[in-house]
Image: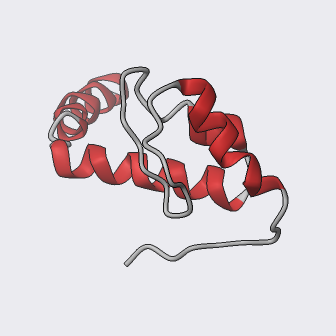
Amino acid sequence: MRKFFLTCAVLITAPLAAFAGPKEEAFQVVEQFKAAFDASNVQGVVKLFATDSFFLGTVSSKIITTTADVEQYFQGLKQFMPRQFKIE
């Protein structure tokens, strides 16, 4: 009987995780970026960029189009610590 209730509980709650839409998925990426940024984890930030993405940083005078350039741009994270930005 206990296994039956446990199975029912899993079957009822499992589909709830599948209801995460684009908004929730995008917010998860923002949270991952924030965590990597705050920790000065350059590789953690870089891995969130698609290989074919375009990026114009706030202190960059050129459009960044390669993963190597994204990594180079975010090397500055290691210089200014501690840091933290707030998501509202």
Q: Residue furthest front?
A: 61
Q: Residue at x 65, y 72 (%)?
A: 84
Asked if residue 83 is positioned above or below residue 16 in the image, the reply reads below
Instruction: Where is residue 78? Give x, y as percent.
Output: 82, 54
Q: Residue 40, can we see it?
A: no
The answer to which image quadrant residue 35 occupies is: bottom right
Image location of residue 10, percent across then percent down:
28, 31
Left or right, 84 with reference to 27: right
- Determine if residue 81 is in view: yes
Q: Nearer the viewer, residue 45 or 62?
A: 62
* Relative to 53, residue 41 above or below: below
Applied colour scheme = secondary structure
Q: Residue at x 50, y 25 (%)?
A: 66
Residue 52 rendering spot, x and y as whole percentages? 36, 22
Depth order, front residue of 27/56: 56
Q: Residue at x 44, y 30 (%)?
A: 65
Query: Height in image: 81 above or below 73?
Result: below
Percent x, y of residue 68: 62, 26
Q: Tell me which residue sits at (47%, 55%) in the image.
A: 31
Q: Quadrant of the N terminus?
A: top left
The answer to which image quadrant residue 80 occupies is bottom right
Q: Name the image quarter holding residue 88.
A: bottom left
Image label count: 0
